[in-house]
Amino acid sequence: MGKGLRGVLLGAVGLVLLGMDGRPRVPKHLVEDGCMTKEARSALALPGNLLTPARCRVVADHKKGGTLRLSLASPPRGWNAYIHNGADVTANHRLISNQLASRSPEDLDRWTPELAVSVVADPDGLGWVVSLQPKASWQLPDVDWESGDFEWLKGEGPNGRHRVTADDFVFPFELIQDTSVEGRVSSMRNYYERFESVEAVDDLTLHVRVKERSFLDLAMFLELTPLPRWLYGFDPSGQAYAQEKRGEWINSHWYQGAIGTGPYRLKEQSKAGLVFQANSAYFGEPASFDRIERLHVQDSLHAFNMGEIDLVIPLPEDLARTGLLERESQPTDPKLRRVNYETMTYFYMGWNQERAPFGDKAVRQAMTLSLDRERILKEVFQGLGSVTSGPFPKQSPCYDRSVEPWPFDLELASSKLEAAGWSDRDGNGVRERMVDGEEIELRFTLLSYGYSEAFRSLTEIWREDLARIGVVMEVEEVAWVPMLERMDTGDFDAYTGAWVPGWDTDLTQLWHSSQADVKASSNRIGFRNAEADRLAEALRAAQEPVDRTAICHEFHALVHEEQPYTFFFQRERAVLYRAPLNEPEFSLLWPYADPAHWSFSELPRSR
C-alpha cells in the first residue's frame, strides 16, 4: 500500500472533516492562528514558496498536559518506516515523526510546513529547492548509553542530539532506488522511477529533480519522512557499512528501536503496550498531552466502559452492546459522547490470479455475484458505510457513480460458472473441471484477519450462499503479522483486505502488470491487463483534472468487468469518547486515530 493509493499498510496525512457536500470543513472551534514562529512566517513569505501557513489544530478551549489512553490492537512490526510495513507501524510512527510537509485541513491541494519551511519550483518545472527547518533535531536512539559503547552515536547538539539535515532525505531516497532493499520500499519504488536526483546542496537545503513531469511528484517528495544515515548506515560499533551491500544490512539492521523528530518520543514498549512522552525538544507546536499510552486490552469496549481508555472505535458487533445502533443516537451518560466520521477506506476480497480458478474473470464475477453485500452491510456492519463498485473513494471525482455494483444473484453466478466449464459432474454438490490435465474441485481458502465477529459473520453467510451454487469456501483466520507475511509471499487463494486511497489518485502501485512480480508489492493478486497498464500510464502523464477523471472512469469500468477484487463497502465509523477529551478530529485520508492534535478541555484527575 503506498502513496497515490494508500493502504491499510501505509498511511496518509491531514486532519480533515467532511461537510454535507463531501468537501473538507474546519470546525469553528479550531484556533485561528498562533502556531507559527516569526521565523517560519518569514520563510513562508519567500517569493515562489509553495507552502502556506498552518493553523493550530487544537480546539480553543484546551489544556496542555495529562495522559491520553487509547487501545492498541497489535504491537508494531518495527519502527523503520521504510522497511516495516503495516497499519500498526504507520499509526504509531506518525506520533514520533514528521514529513517535509502535510496537506492543509482547509484545502487538501495546499501544503503546510513540517520539516520544510519553503519549497520553490525550478524554472523548468522539473525540480524543487527545499529549505529545512533549522531548529529540528532527532530524538536520541534507544540504546544502552551507560555501557559507553554508543558514544559514536551522539551528535553535536544539546544532550547529544543530531540536527535534521538534507542528508536525512537523501539517504531514504537511496534506499528506495536500491532494489536490494526490501520491505515497504518495494511498494514505494514505482513512484520514484521518474526522480532523477535528491541532492543535499548544504545541511539545510535539498534539491529534488525529476526526469519528466507527473501529477504525483510534488506529493511524493513532500510526504517523505527522514531517516538518519548516522544511525542506519553504521554497525553497532560505529563502522560504516559497505554501500554495495546496503540491502543486506538495512533489511535486518541491528537497531530495531524507535527514533523520530516529532512531537512525541517512544518512552516504553512492553507487553502492556506503548508509552509516548512529549518531546520537550520538538521544534513545532508543543504536544497537547504529556503522555499518550496505547494499551493492549482484550476488549476495547469493556476497557472504555471501565474507564481504562478515553476513546473507543467500536467494532460493528460492539455497537449492539452499547445500545447505539442508530446512526445519530447518543449515550445517556453526559460524560460520554459519540461522533461519526466518514473515511475513504474501502474493503474488498482479493483473488490470487496466479492460482486456478481465479485467473478466469467469469469465476471472479461469480464470486462477487454470490456475496450478499447489501444484507451483510446492513445486518452485520450496522449500515455504517455503502456498497462500492470500484477502487476509488466516493468522495473523489474518479469514482464513476454510473457503474452499479454487481447484484446478489446466485442464479447468474451459477450460469457464469457453468459457462466457464465448472459443473457438478459426479453429483457430490461441488463443481469441478479439468485444469492442466487434472480434475479439480471448485474450493478455496479465504484468509481473514481473525479479530472481528463481523468478518466471521460475513464469511458464514457467504460460505452458505457459495455452497448453494456448488462452491466450497474454507476460512482461515490469521493474526495480522502472519497474514501480512502470507500476502507478501502470495501464499493464499483469496484474502479480506482494505485500502485507504490517497488524495492524488494513482493506479500503478496496485494494478500495473510491472508490479505483479515485485516481491511484497501491493499487486499481490497478480493482476495483469494490458488495457489497465495503458490507463495507469496515461493517468500518470495527465495533468488536467478533467483528463484524469475521464481516465479513472475508464479504469473503473474495466475493473468492474474484470473483478480482480470483489469490492465490498466504503466505511463510516462511530467513535465513543469520554469527557474531558475534546471532540477528536479524524482525517478523511488517515485511517487511524491520530491523536497528535487532540486535547483535553480540563486535565483529568490522576488515575
Image: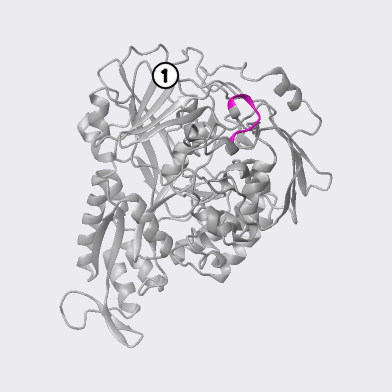
Direction from residue 149 to residue 126 in the image, left or right: right
Mark 1 element type: loop
Residue at x 65%, y 32% (from the top left corner): 163
Residue 222 showing in the rendered view: yes
Give the magenta range. Answer: 154-159
Residue at x 75%, y 26% (from the top left corner): 43
Task: Give the image quarter of residue 226.
Answer: top right
| Magenta stretch contains residue 529 | no
Residue 508 showing in the rendered view: no
Give the image location of residue 568, x and y in percent.
37, 52
Direction from residue 374 to residue 55 in the image, left or right: right
* Image vertical order of residue 494 relative to residue 454, above or below: below
Q: Which residue is mark 1?
A: 582
Residue at x 45%, y 25% (from the top left corner): 277
Predominant secondary structure in magenta?
Answer: loop
Give the image location of residue 167, x and y in percent.
68, 43
Task: Give the image quarter of residue 54.
Answer: top right
* Image vertical order of residue 468 relative to residue 106, above or below: below
* Image vertical order of residue 236 relative to residue 304, above or below: below
- Front residue of 280/358: it is 280
Q: Residue furthest left?
A: 428
- Front residue of 414/32: it is 32
Q: Residue furthest bottom?
A: 437
Structural crowding at the residue carrying mark 1, measured as other residues with C-alpha within 10 Å and reported as few (<14), some (14–19) or many (≥20): some
Residue at x 30%, y 55% (from the top left corner): 448
Give the image location of residue 69, x and y in percent.
35, 26
Give the image location of residue 51, x and y in percent.
70, 32
Q: Amino acid type of disc 1?
A: Asn
| Magenta stretch contains residue 156 | yes
Picture quarter with the C terminus: top left
- Front residue of 54/491: it is 491
